[in-house]
């Protein structure tokens, strides 16, 4: 058995820029301090893991529609509040660039290089018609059982 | 004292279809694998437990207004994003039906039959003028002390 | 080492009236029953800690804009749903007053008097140009490491 204080799991349900940032700052902070971190990307959160250019493959009309409407990866996100048709998000991204703060895409890469385990939720993939090829490399796929197995041994479990 | 790894509590604050699904998938998944699960329905989440047809009783004007505006139970929910005046929600429900995925109402029934403990938050009931008769059968009512008592002994505690 | 069952941490990410209420009801409930509670206010949640009247100091244009647009403290919040341009929020506040329920500002004061530890997130402060002088007295400031240090020893950790 592990020491629960050394492990953290995050369910990333949202694809809002602000919540994604919070999730990745927690994950990279914990991994940097030697904790074992697993992030489960589910529902809207799954779109944070999409590649910019979808691999061509047969899709139903509904799957195509999801493909058009969902954000294309970690850099295509907007604020959950004060978005103002994109102006608020642009302003926030500018501020972050000026202060040399990492953007969501940078934080995702940092998480991968710190060996944070990135898991894509199979149920959400099926529901939205997202295939493994549509998602970035270096991730695993898993369902609720995978999540529960990890969360059970972790001292910090959050739903974001 | 119990084994915390065998227990999970979920605070269901939201009544969005997507978040309700996440909550019930976690709850039924955990209960199926032998965990003891308690779900606390509070604030907007409380409306997931409403009966379709409210029992007639004396209500203030404000209580009537809450009654009209809040969703009437687990099947009357909409997506938190991409709802598009209901079209997005309908599309998602269609997809789920075609793929034989359970809807929110089905998942709630599944949770009840798996003996997930369903608790309605007393403070929220008072605030919104919801009486116990307005809610489905088979649930308990309780406040923050009830919650804390259960969460303290649980290894997984999430706020959804 | 402490007893994890005696400690709770809450990340308060949101500044919605409803979520703030949930957070403070949990925090004051736990503190009243003898638990040690730490609340981390991050991103939008940070604005719950703002003083009504900002201290005059040099600010960039963007910092001024954030200052105008973000709620000014715990009493300047609105519902996440059914706000209806403020009418829903006013209605809810009226109901609470009539039922003698504490408002968000009252709950914050209650939390402070119960010795709940209030921590403002340094990264969010920098991002939004909020200085320590802009925030109420009696709080600490800290980053993700502070959070992880506390959460590791706590049995209940929630993201709100």
Image (spheres, coloured by chain):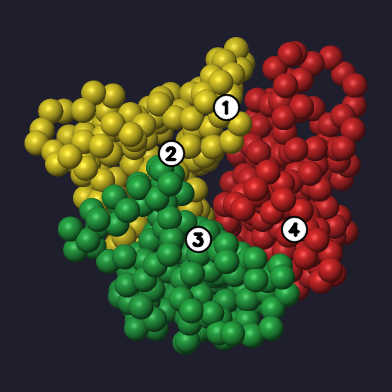
Chain colours: A yellow, B green, C red
**Residue B85 in view in this figure:** yes
Callouts 4 and 3 in the same chain: no
Residue ID for mark 2? A15
Name the front one of labels 2 and 3. 3
The answer for how far apart the CA atoms under marks 1 and 4 are is 26 Å
**Residue A93 in view in this figure:** no
Where in the figure is residue B109, as x and y percent of width and height?
A: 35, 78
The answer for how far apart the CA atoms under marks 4 and 3 are is 20 Å
Callouts 2 and 4 in the same chain: no
**Residue ID at (65%, 25%):** C127
Chain holding disc 2:
A
Q: Quadrant of residue C88?
A: bottom right
Chain holding disc 3:
B
**Residue ID at (42%, 79%):** B116
Residue ID for mark 1? A84
Name the front one of labels 1 and 2. 1
The answer for how far apart the CA atoms under marks 2 and 3 are is 18 Å
Residue ID for mark 3? B15
Residue ID for mark 4? C91
Callouts 1 and 4 in the same chain: no
- Report crowding for label 1: few under 14, some 14 to 19, many 20 or more residues within 10 A (C-alpha): few
**Residue ID at (55%, 69%):** B46
């Amino acid at each position: 058995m592990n020491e629960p204080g050394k492990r953290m799991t995050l369910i990333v349900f949202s694809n809002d820029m602000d919540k994604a940032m919070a999730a990745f700052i927690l994950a990279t902070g914990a991994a940097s301090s030697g904790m074992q971190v697993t992030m489960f990307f589910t529902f809207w959160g799954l779109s944070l893991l999409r590649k910019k250019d979808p691999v061509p493959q047969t899709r139903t009309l509904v799957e195509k529609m999801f493909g058009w409407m969902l954000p294309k990866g970690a850099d295509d996100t907007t604020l959950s509040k004060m978005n103002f048709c994109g102006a608020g998000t642009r302003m926030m991204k500018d501020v972050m660039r000026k202060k040399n703060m990492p953007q969501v895409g940078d934080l995702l890469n940092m998480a991968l290089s710190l060996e944070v385990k990135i898991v894509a939720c199979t149920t959400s993939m099926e529901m939205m018609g997202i295939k493994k090829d549509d998602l970035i490399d270096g991730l695993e796929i898993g369902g609720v059982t995978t999540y529960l197995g990890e969360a059970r041994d972790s001292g910090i479990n959050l739903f974001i």
